Image (tube, helix red, strand yellow):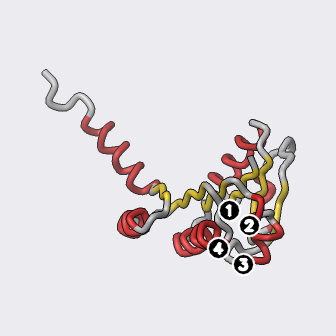
Amino acid sequence: MNIIVLGCGRVGAALAMMLDAEGHSVTVIDQNSDAFRRLGAGYKGNMVLGTGIDEDVLRSAGIEKADAFAAVTNGDNTNIMASQIASMIFHVPRVVTRIYDPIREETYRTLGLDTICPTSIGARLFKERLLAGIGDS
């Protein structure tokens, strides 16, 4: 698969390296060239320097042939906008968006984006672990 990962932070770099190791064609976009250092020496994919909401940057990353797009920058607005561009303008078949704000995540999920909210996931996991075994006698 041709996959574009927007954001080369810890999650983006780990995702790109996993996908690359599985044999997918991966391109990572980030606006900070230093972020690409997170990609291991064995990473065989492409790196594109630029903003993920710029259509020219997306084109240079190969979005017109992408099978999937993951927006995992630290900015909800950037992730939302880039995902909408990937989905609505370039018709990428599979688009997944990270949104930190649970209220916004729910809103955009309702509007049709495939979203992941690490804030909600983390809170649920903490609650489960905190309450595990409590009340069991």
Identify residue type, mark 1. Gly
The Cα–Cα distance between marks 4 and 3, rounded to whole angstroms, is 12 Å
Residue 67, given in percent of the width and then of the height, sits at: 70, 53
The Cα–Cα distance between marks 2 and 3, rounded to whole angstroms, is 12 Å
Q: Nearer the viewer, mark 2 or mark 4?
A: 4
SS at circle 4: helix
* Residue 119, visible in the rendered structure: yes
The crowd level at tag 1 (other Cα within 10 Å; few <14, some 14-19, many 20+) is many
Q: Mark 1 or mark 2: which comes first in sequence?
A: 1
| Rendered residue at 85%/41% (across/down) | 42
The crowd level at tag 4 (other Cα within 10 Å; few <14, some 14-19, many 20+) is few
| Rendered residue at 46%/54% (across/down) | 118
Q: Which mark is residue 89?
A: 4
Q: Which residue is mark 2?
A: 30
The Cα–Cα distance between marks 1 and 2, rounded to whole angstroms, is 5 Å
Q: Mark 4 or mark 1: which comes first in sequence?
A: 1
Q: Nearer the viewer, mark 4 or mark 1?
A: 4
Q: Nearer the viewer, mark 4 or mark 3?
A: 4
Identify residue type, mark 4. Ile
Q: Which residue is mark 3?
A: 54
Residue 134, given in percent of the width and then of the height, sits at: 19, 32
